[in-house]
């Protein structure tokens, strides 16, 4: 688990204590190895935490970005609502991000 994922988990428990806990590393498109960092399966809501945005990490390089787009398209095609967080978002306003995800979970029809 990355430091950013641990930070998200802490914010989730603190800012949404009565909301359901997510499943970690949920594989949503077998046999592909694509996983969501966090997922609420019944509601088809997921969170992807994008590390390395300022250090030329995999998510910000051309090949990694292309793979991310393929994964996003596959998720959308399967009816998932995916929220993306960067380290800046979790540092600067974690409450806003958590509120967005929580609202999606609460309004989502159950699969």
Image: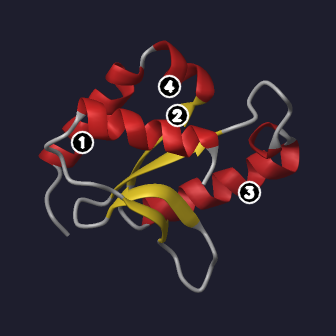
Image height check: is 32 above or below 79?
Answer: below
Q: Nearer the viewer, mark 1 or mark 2?
A: 2
Q: Which residue is mark 4?
A: 90
How would you rate the neighbour count of disc 1 (Cα within 10 Å): few for under 14, some for 14-19, many for 20 or more?
A: some
Q: Are marks 3 and 1 in contact (CB under 8 Å)?
A: no
Give how far apart the Cα atoms at labels 3 and 2 are: 17 Å
Instruction: Name the residue beneath numbered marker 1.
Output: 104
Q: Which residue is mark 3?
A: 67
SS under mark 1: helix
The location of residue 99, given as percent across then percent down, is 27, 28
**Residue 19 at x, y percent in the picture:** 17, 46
Q: Pointers 3 and 2 in contact (CB under 8 A)?
A: no
Display colour scheme: secondary structure
Q: Which x, y percent locates residue 47?
A: 45, 47
Mark 3: secondary structure: helix
Q: Quadrant of the N terminus?
A: bottom right
Q: Which residue is label 2 attached to?
A: 85
Mark found first going from the N terminus, 3 or 4 = 3
| Image marks 4 and 2: residues in contact by CB distance under 8 Å | yes
The mark lying in front, picked from 4 and 1, is 4
Q: Which residue is located at x 20 percent, y 53 percent? A: 20
How far apart are the alpha carbons under marks 3 and 4?
A: 23 Å
Real-space Cα distance between discs 1 and 2?
A: 15 Å
Between the residue at mark 3 and the residue at mark 1, the CA separation in whole angstroms equals 25 Å
Q: How many marks?
A: 4
C-alpha gap between disc 4 and disc 2: 7 Å
Q: Using the rendered view, name the quadrant where residue 80 is placed.
A: bottom left
Rendered view: 32 above or below 55: below
Q: Residue at x 28, y 32 (%)?
A: 14
Q: Residues within 10 Å of mark 3 (few under 14, many from 20)?
A: some
The answer to which of marks 3 and 2 sits earlier in the sequence is 3
């Amino acid at each position: 688990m990355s430091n950013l994922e641990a930070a998200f988990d802490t914010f989730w428990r603190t800012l949404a204590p009565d909301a359901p806990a997510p499943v970690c590393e949920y594989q949503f498109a077998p046999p592909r190895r694509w996983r969501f960092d966090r997922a609420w399966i019944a509601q088809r809501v997921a969170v992807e935490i994008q590390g390395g945005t300022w250090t030329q990490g995999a998510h910000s390089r051309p090949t990694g970005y292309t793979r991310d787009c393929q994964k996003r398209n596959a998720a959308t095609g399967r009816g998932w609502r995916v929220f993306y967080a960067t380290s800046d978002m979790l540092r600067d306003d974690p409450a806003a991000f958590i509120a967005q995800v929580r609202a999606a979970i609460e309004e989502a029809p159950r699969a």
